[in-house]
Image (cartoon, coloured by chain):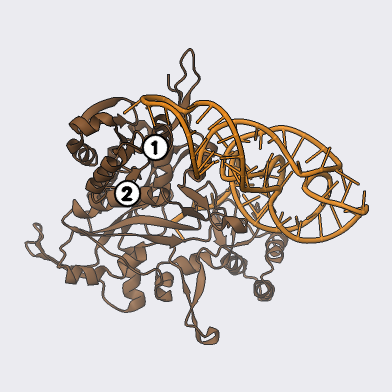
Amino acid sequence: MATEQNNLAAIIAHCKEYGFVFQSSEIYDGLAAVYDYGQWGVELKKNIKDTWWRSMVYMHENIVGLDSAIFMHPTIWKASGHVDNFSDPMIDNKDSKKRYRVDHLIEGHVEQMSLGNELIVQMEALLAKDDFGGLKQLIEDNQIKCPISGTCNWTEVRQFNLMFATQLGSVAEESDTIYLRPETAQGIFVNFLNVQKTGRMKIPFGIAQIGKAFRNEIVARGFIFRMREFEQMEMQFFVRPGTQKEWYEHWKKTRMQWHLDLGIAKDKYRFHDHVKLAHYADAACDIEYEFPMGFKEVEGIHSRGDFDLKQHQEFSKKKQMYFDNDIDEVTGKPYGNYIPYVIETSIGLDRTILMVLSEAYTEEDLSTEDKKDSRVVLKFPPKLAPIKLAILPLMKKDGLAEIARSLMLECKDSFLCFYEEKDAIGKRYRRMDALGTPFCVTIDHQTKEDQTVTIRYRDSMAQERIHMNDVKDIVMQALK
RNA sequence: GCGGAAGUCGUAUAGUGGCUAUUACCUCAGCCUUCCAAGCUGAAGACGACAGUUCGAUUCUGUUCUUCCGCUCCA
């Protein structure tokens, strides 16, 4: 009987041991919350990206791809709200859970109580010194209360530098501060008209992008779940105002189906609808997966309204409008010029990798009465498996290796194959199990006579005798 | 960020203020074997880092880095 276990520590150790994920800069004691993908991790990651891209871009005639740069004009982050919301000292009220910019809180208090300038002067002196302790003291000494909860139960004052800053230009004094993007979405928004015009796109249409994003998280933890450098797969879908509700529902359903198509059971997922909405959204939900550490967000679906395009129109002074020639049945006239509304689907690639790993990782007890035995197997869907096929001559001699090599040559152009002639065949099977390889074929003496090989299936461990010419087709069939 | 715990070969582990720092698996070379982790021979590989105490520190102390657990945060 198989015993199944899903604990994070075992998965982390397995990822390290079998070349999926390494701690970044490990020989220098590592770098917190940064990880590298090893030889098999990178294949898994690529396969997940391909699956997403295929389903979003190839399967939708009205969605096209984009690869915008990580560096963007600094004003973009002012327009998006990232600069203002995250560069000033903040304080949270523990009772209302409301977060305030410290300067706004104190200024608001002064205004409300019609106090003099003195408090503002003190505050500015403390702000200039980055004296967060002093700022908190100032708030407490003056009995500044949260307008919502009415209490003085404050956290420490903290500075949230969400974005990583760097310098553009090689001479420091002349350089401009720019940011590493904290989300790929803005690169899509600022290219909205480029793509719409050159692609002759008609609303509704979408732009998809896979790419790195960077966030200076206060707490980055949970293996590859929350990293400082991570990768997103985002799609922004532009719709006619007034239709956003139905499109939001459409994408909720479509994205959940994508998850289920990975072969993951429905009860491992749930929707989490946001009650408290962000400044830009009129509806938002997360798709959560039950990780070893509990239900956590993998993907977000947000109805962003026209917030982003409107902001960019204002900051760039360039119209971000679309002319809609379709006839409005109510007025009998074209819908005309408008700023489209946006539905965003945004999935964390690294989180998806962890999800797929968590789902695949299985420890099986294969003990019989006379022999204790066990195996660790990664039960990836074949299309996600790093290696699709292992080609194993039963032994090195007697020309078996040559036959195996010819099969390698036939298959390696179509999918990733792994050739191995060392060690007993059972050991090689188990090694492939640990990497999640769905198929192994073994070439033996009989192959020389009738061109048949043994195919061995990862999940069932069953073996079958098939003709060598059929191997490629069987694997290709499983990858669909 | 706060509180707690922990870092010994790739993985999992044992142990010690003092002799060449265990053991298993893994890896590598060879022999043998050949359809589910076989055997034999041999080899490589670790006390996270930096200080301090000490004649001597992997062990005690401090700092730091990293990881895990709980809280917190998550536009």
Chain ID at mark 1: A
> Which residue corresponds to mark 2?
A47
Q: Which chain is displayed in brown in the rendered image?
A: A
Q: Which mark is residue A432?
A: 1
Residue furthest left in the image:
A332
Decide if residue A9 is on the left or right side of residue A208.
Answer: right
The residues tagged by marks 1 and 2 sit, at their Cα atoms, a distance apart of 18 Å
Does dot 2 land on a helix, a strand or a loop? helix
Residue A410 against residue A306 in the figure, above or below: above
| A234 left or right of B12 in image | left
The image quadrant that residue A447 belongs to is top left
Q: Which chain is orange?
A: B
| Residue A355: percent from left, percent from top | 41, 41
Q: Position of residue A287 (x, y in %)?
A: 37, 43
Question: Height in image: A56 above or below A123?
Answer: above
Q: Residue at x 31, y 25 (%)?
A: A462
What residue is shown at x 53% (from left), y 41% (from top)? A13
Which residue shows up at 28% across the image and 78% down it?
A: A318
